Image (tube, rainbow, N blue to C red):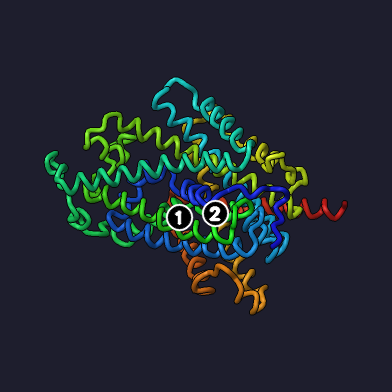
Amino acid sequence: MNDNNGNLKRNLKNRHIQMIALGGAIGTGLFYGSKETISSAGPSVVLVYLLCGFVIYLILRAMGEMAVDRPVSGSFSQYAYDNLGEYAGFLSGWSYWSTYIFVSMAELSAIGSYMKFWFPTFPAWATALVFMLLITSINLVNVKLYGEFEFWFAIIKVVTIILFIVMGVVFIVFGLGAKQGLDVGVHNLWSHGGFAPNGIQGIMLCIVGVLFSFGGSELIGITAGEAEEPEKSIPKAISKVVYRILTYYILAILVILMIFPWDQVGAKSGFDGSPFVQIFRYVHISYAAGIINFVVIAAAASVYNSSLFSNSRMLHGLAVQGNAPKIFLSTGKSGTPVASILLSSGVTLVVVIISYLSPEKVFGYMMNITTISIVINWFMILITQIAFRKKRTHEQLKNLKYKMPFYPLSNYFVLAFLTVCIVIMFTSKGYRLAVLVAPAWLLALSIFYGIKYKLKKKV
């Protein structure tokens, strides 16, 4: 096996890998944004989560097949480089790096906004700067410390969700809702305008938001270069992470929908509009909004932590390919790619400046580019895996340890599904800008590649 890791060390254990992927996929959307998907599709949002969960599972299986066969730094960018050529490796790697730079900026911006819940006069940019410096320091020490912090960040979110589900079930089973004047029960799933009250249009509009709530689960592939026994840990992580995410999301949403009619979920604004806050308050837990605020900050910090990890490893992998300056090959004594971490963190300083100038609009600016970039990355994973298969002999394919199920039909199904999502985004006012940005984004990356290629020929 050719690791090609450039001195990165395999110190990530299976529990780290599972929680890294779990933490990356469970963000603020469930705690604060689930009311938006519920208001769009009603109770049928549960089916949307199942469908999108299946799509993400296939994307992870496509990536997992390549990662188990060759667990290297750079993950799917390196696989694109190996199977589709230098340009594909450049495009895939820098697109992914840029995506999670914007995710990092968005999460830092979110942390600054959420801290105002307790410290309304403290500037958002200062909070963003403190968290950036803290998490960067953690990533610089060693990958095991990063894994431990991400493990505990994820535990906070998971414990909150489990506690919420248990309290909700008790609330329903023991009739506590009825005592407080709530019409609680399974009938709420169909008695308020039907299971899909807004029809197929509501379901279609909901798909994009739900699909992107799973974004970050592909971090499993980034960990392959530093995982202990990747041929065992990667398949375990993929299967466990997908069903855990689906379980947490679906059970939590079912509890919400059985306690409140779908059109009453998140009736208020801010944290008071969070379904979690609503239910915590009904079971007489004081400071419910404060508790959720803490969890959401932990969730945002977790995503920033994961984004910095994935970006530094992707940049290191690009340097291995020759698609990034050689300085990013360097690692510290502990095996962390110091230069890659410092650049990936330093670029996010831009959000500190933007937060100072326009704190209310930062999140929207960042997410428009992020949204379409994630789709591009998923496209690249599936296309690369098709090329990966075509380059293998019959004997090599027979010996693959972790195979993509239903290949190649599964690839074409997911590619078609992602294409439909792009069409939905284009017809939706909230997402249209993201689709329009895509050609310009790809053109910009192609121009940078052309410049790099010309400079390389001159040397």
- Mark 2 is surrounded, within 10 Å at the Cα level, by few (under 14), some (14 to 19) or many (20 or more) other residues, namely many
Q: CA distance from mark 1 to mark 2?
A: 9 Å
Query: Residue at 53% across / 73% down in the picture?
Result: 407
Image quarter (top left, top right, bottom left or bottom right) of the N terminus: bottom right
Query: Residue at 30% across / 58% down in the picture?
Result: 44
Helix, strand or loop at disc 2? helix
Helix, strand or loop at disc 1? helix
* Residue tagged 1: 241
Looking at the rendered structure, the kind of residue marked 2 is: Ile
Q: Quadrant of residue 296?
A: top left
Q: Are marks 1 and 2 in contact (CB under 8 Å)?
A: yes
The answer to whether 441 appears left or right of 185 in the picture is right
Looking at the rendered structure, the kind of residue marked 1 is: Val
* Residue tagged 2: 220
**Is residue 91 shown to the viewer in this render?**
yes
Nearest the eye: 158 or 196: 158
